[in-house]
Image (cartoon, rainbow, N blue to C red):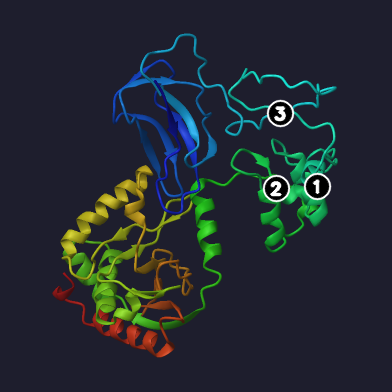
Amino acid sequence: MKQSITMPVLSDTMETGRLVRWNKQPGEAVKKGEAIAEVETDKAILDVEAFADGFLAGPLAPVDTDIPVRQVIGYLVDEAEKGQAATPPSPGLGEPASIPSPAPAVSSTPSTPIMSSPSPVAVPPTQPSTALEKAATVAPPSTPLPTGVQASPYARALARDLGVNIASVAPGPDGTIHAAQVLAAALTAPEADLRQGPPYTLERPSTLRAAVARNMAATVQTPTFQISAQLPVEPLHAVAKKAGVTLTLAMTRACALTVAEDPWFNHVWTAKGVAKRERVDVGIAVDTGDGLVTPVLRDAARRPLAELAEDWRILLGKVKKGRLSPEDYQGASFYLSNLGIFPVVSHFNAIVPLGASAILAIAATDAQGKADFTLSCDHRVIFGADAARFLAALAKRLGQADSSLA
């Protein structure tokens, strides 16, 4: 029996996954639960595990390819098959399938179709009967495309009709520009025309960087405001040093206790109403060198600092290895971004992520032992006076930092 191995759905927001490597080759035996491939999601590299005992069979999807979720990337069979190709690319996964040339003529005598390949081959009609068919058979214009990018004839015709520069359209997961990408480009704000500037090349962003871009663009509709204050940091620094934890972790604990006292900072606006969360989960921004991740410390207001420190150690280890799972970085109700390690940063604003109503941005400590704290808030949930009271309560807690934070 031949069973399909598909690109798994590893998070609610995952649309594609990048195949990093195959751990097995066609014909090799695999055990149920064994990692047969590695997939890079928007935040981490995760294993694709075999769902049964058997043998890996091709064709396998090529590595370093963005593949839509639930699309077939390989097969699992009961018996090893002989003479298999290692990893032949299949249409839609690697290089785009070439468009077949029209047949000289189509016989009017019906015949039984013969399946000679797993890839469907469309026979173009002799007389296009609809506007869609006519557009699909128009010869593609000579608009130059970036190296390695192709566009379907219909996508080219549609771009011409809509006045969209086909060269500026981002291709789909299979590396080809289809009608969906042209329509999306037509509905979005126009991008800058780079042709009049210096020469440039296009580079495909990492899945992490692309995910950050999507998430930040999705926050544009959130009505936000910022409020800042100079708060003392040295007392908390002393407590953190005594407890053997980082200042960021101690700050997370202080923020969580303050949020617990004012639950509006733990709520979030939804289309159905205000969602009131029952615990404070704090997402902490961490720089990976290639992007931004936000590991989440769960129930940070009720759990002791030592317990949070152990969780944080484990999360940072996963970040370094690129092995965060979705449950490690999703679902925070409050966010913290600390750039205090950069002495030149005296002030900055942070963007409120989806799923939260506030994020606190902390700059470097000055000569007086204070730092600039800027609170960005969703104005649908939090008002200016609420934010001012929150900063006042946090200032009091930081100025009197003691063992109560533990």
Quarter location, residue 230: bottom left
Q: Amino acid at mark 2?
A: Ala
Q: Secondary structure at mark 1?
A: helix
Q: Amino acid at mark 1?
A: Ala
Q: Secondary structure at mark 3?
A: loop
Mark 3 vs mark 2: which is more N-terminal? 3
Quarter location, residue 243: bottom left
The structure residue drawn at horizontal position 32% and vertical position 87%, both measured from the top left corner, is 392
Residue 403 appears left or right of 131: left
Query: In front: mark 1 or mark 2?
Result: 1
Give the alpha-carbon distance from disc 3 to disc 2, as whole Å: 17 Å
Q: Which label belongs to residue 184?
A: none
The image position of residue 293, as x and y in percent, is 41, 55
Q: Amino acid at mark 3?
A: Ser
Mark 1 vs mark 3: which is more N-terminal? 3
Q: Which label belongs to residue 98?
A: 3
- Mark 1 = which residue? 131
The image position of residue 332, as x and y in percent, is 34, 64
Residue in the foreground of this view, choosing between 220 and 159: 159
Q: Secondary structure at mark 2?
A: helix
The structure residue drawn at horizontal position 36% and vertical position 58%, both measured from the top left corner, is 330
Residue 170 appears left or right of 70: right
Residue in the foreground of this view, choosing between 60 and 198: 60
- Mark 2 = which residue? 179
The crowd level at tag 1 (other Cα within 10 Å; few <14, some 14-19, many 20+) is: few
**Can you say whether 133 is above or below 360 in the image?**
above
Residue at the limit of the structure toward the front, as seen here: 109
The structure residue drawn at horizontal position 42% and vertical position 78%, both measured from the top left corner, is 375
The image position of residue 200, as x and y in percent, is 72, 47
